[in-house]
């Protein structure tokens, strides 16, 4: 049976300094008997991964899959993986990656190429946008296991009661939100405005919905100081600080769960969030059961909808002692059986195309039909090796504008300037 591990010895001191605490028992080859595969993941996911790992262990006698519980924070798990890989530590065979990690880890030489392991048919079985997030400079390093895309939830009962159709544009969203809100008991629109990666996701959807872009990964051109970007930030800033706000002042402290709880408590008309919210809203004990609708993210008139691409996938550490077993496990996670085990109880969006027509998954999550169409228009974050730095620059400037410390145009000009400086060497190399 698979066990929880703790942080590998070779970087536990660095991790402790970083986190103030380690993870739990030593995984992999530090334990006696059989071959061990270890992977670090968020603690909330481990219960749903257990059945997937147990089936793999049954089919591979003598192999143990160690699901190592890391910190809840995505950034801290990334730092733990970075510390391990930087040290050449072999304890983690599998790297469970957010969509934004591929370029950083691949550029550093920390991941094995999966080009030969996944042929054209195997790749075609996966959602294109989710698969593309694992490709860096033409090579596949990460295989998607579950995917995500930003969507807009709304109180269907309230809109139906007012004779209103769900919005398609920014203006329609604002108009309906103002009509139906009764602040402070009920706000029109909640989203993720805290200074973290979620703010990037929200801004990127509005930015692309205005027809703009952040960084072109092919040319490293920066579009943050263009009119489309300024319009996008003015929209977000205006939702909480305009003459007739539709978002609560505290929205700049919200992450996914804070905004979801407000919506689920009946205190918001619209919510921007991820697909997992649907399953929670439809539970038998949910006050919103049967009262929630979902549409693609709104956009400017004449522009397409653009939900930010999210999701998690697996790569193989360049230092793994068991790369063949690690590859077998990755293939196992993208079977229909594994996708059912992981996605049916959670409401996660599968990465396997066939899962969207699977009767068991469709019965558990009727939202899959809509989600497949929405995912086709998903917008990835730029695949650049210094993504974390680019994100930090933009987060800080967006937060300054949302807090009223800088006008949107000035904040984005500063972000564009800093981003170009940060990308300077790489941009020159591309010319």
Image: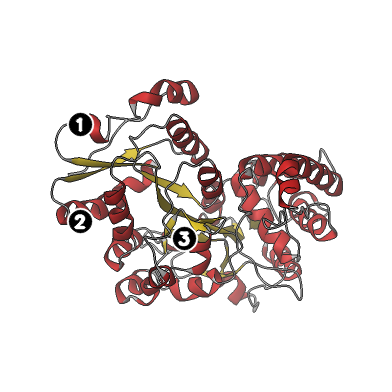
Kindly indicate the quadrant of the structure image that contains residue 328: bottom left
Q: Is residue 187 visible?
A: no
Q: What's the distance in space between the residues labelled 3 and 2, CA to CA?
A: 22 Å
Residue receiving disc 3: 147
Mark with earlier residue (2, 1): 1
Residue receiving disc 1: 31
In this figure, what is the number of numbered marks? 3
Q: What's the distance in space between the residues labelled 2 and 1, CA to CA?
A: 21 Å
Task: Identify which residue, 92 or 363, lies in the foreground.
Answer: 92
Task: Identify which residue, 120 or 392, lies in the foreground.
Answer: 120
Q: Which mark is residue 428?
A: none
Q: Are marks 2 and 1 in contact (CB under 8 Å)?
A: no
Mark with earlier residue (3, 2): 2
Q: What's the distance in space between the residues labelled 3 and 1, CA to CA?
A: 33 Å
How many neighbours does mark 1 have within 10 angstroms: few (below 14), some (14-19), or many (20 or more)?
few
Residue receiving disc 2: 55
Q: Is residue 159 visible?
A: yes
- Could you tell me which secondary element the residue under label 2 belongs to? helix
Q: Is residue 27 left or right of residue 134?
A: left
Q: Is residue 107 left or right of residue 43?
A: right
How many neighbours does mark 3 have within 10 angstroms: few (below 14), some (14-19), or many (20 or more)?
many
Q: Position of residue 263 (x, y in %)?
A: 55, 56
- Could you tell me which secondary element the residue under label 3 belongs to? strand
The coloring applied to the image is: secondary structure
């Amino acid at each position: 049976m698979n066990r929880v591990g703790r942080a590998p010895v070779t970087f536990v001191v660095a991790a402790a300094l970083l986190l103030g605490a380690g993870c739990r028992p030593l995984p992999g080859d530090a334990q006696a008997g059989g071959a061990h595969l270890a992977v670090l993941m968020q603690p909330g996911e481990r219960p749903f991964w257990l059945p997937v790992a147990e089936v793999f262990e049954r089919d591979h006698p003598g192999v143990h899959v160690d699901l190592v519980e890391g910190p809840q924070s995505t950034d801290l798990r990334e730092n733990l993986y970075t510390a391990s890989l930087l040290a050449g530590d072999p304890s983690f065979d599998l790297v469970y990656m957010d969509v934004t990690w591929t370029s950083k880890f691949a550029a550093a030489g920390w991941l094995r190429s999966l080009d030969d392991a996944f042929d054209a048919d195997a790749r075609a079985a996966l959602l294109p946008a989710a698969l593309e997030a694992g490709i860096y400079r033409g090579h596949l390093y990460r295989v998607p296991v579950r995917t995500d895309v930003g969507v807009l939830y709304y109180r269907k009962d309230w809109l139906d009661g007012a004779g209103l159709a769900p919005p398609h544009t920014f203006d329609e969203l604002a108009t309906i939100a103002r009509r139906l809100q009764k602040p402070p008991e009920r706000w029109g629109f909640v989203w993720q405005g805290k200074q973290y990666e979620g703010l990037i996701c929200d801004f990127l959807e509005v930015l692309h919905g205005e027809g703009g872009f952040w960084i072109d990964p092919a040319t490293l051109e920066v579009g943050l100081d263009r009119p489309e970007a300024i319009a996008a930030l003015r929209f977000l800033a205006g939702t909480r600080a305009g003459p007739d706000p539709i978002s609560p002042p505290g929205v700049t402290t919200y992450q996914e769960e804070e905004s979801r709880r407000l919506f689920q408590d009946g205190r918001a008309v619209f919510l921007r969030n991820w697909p997992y919210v649907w399953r929670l809203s439809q539970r038998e004990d949910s006050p919103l059961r049967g009262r929630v609708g979902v549409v693609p993210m709104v956009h400017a008139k004449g522009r397409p909808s653009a939900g930010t691409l999210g999701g998690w996938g697996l790569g193989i550490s360049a230092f793994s002692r068991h790369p063949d077993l690690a590859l077998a496990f990755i293939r196992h996670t993208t079977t229909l059986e594994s996708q059912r085990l992981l996605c049916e109880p959670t409401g996660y969006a599968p990465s396997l195309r066939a899962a969207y027509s699977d009767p068991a998954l469709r019965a558990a999550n009727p939202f899959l039909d809509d989600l497949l169409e929405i995912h086709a228009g998903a917008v990835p974050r730029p695949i650049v090796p210094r993504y974390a730095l680019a994100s930090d620059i933009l987060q800080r400037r967006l937060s300054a504008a949302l807090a009223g410390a800088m006008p949107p145009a000035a904040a984005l000009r500063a972000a564009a300037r800093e981003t170009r400086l940060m990308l300077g060497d790489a941009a020159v190399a591309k010319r």
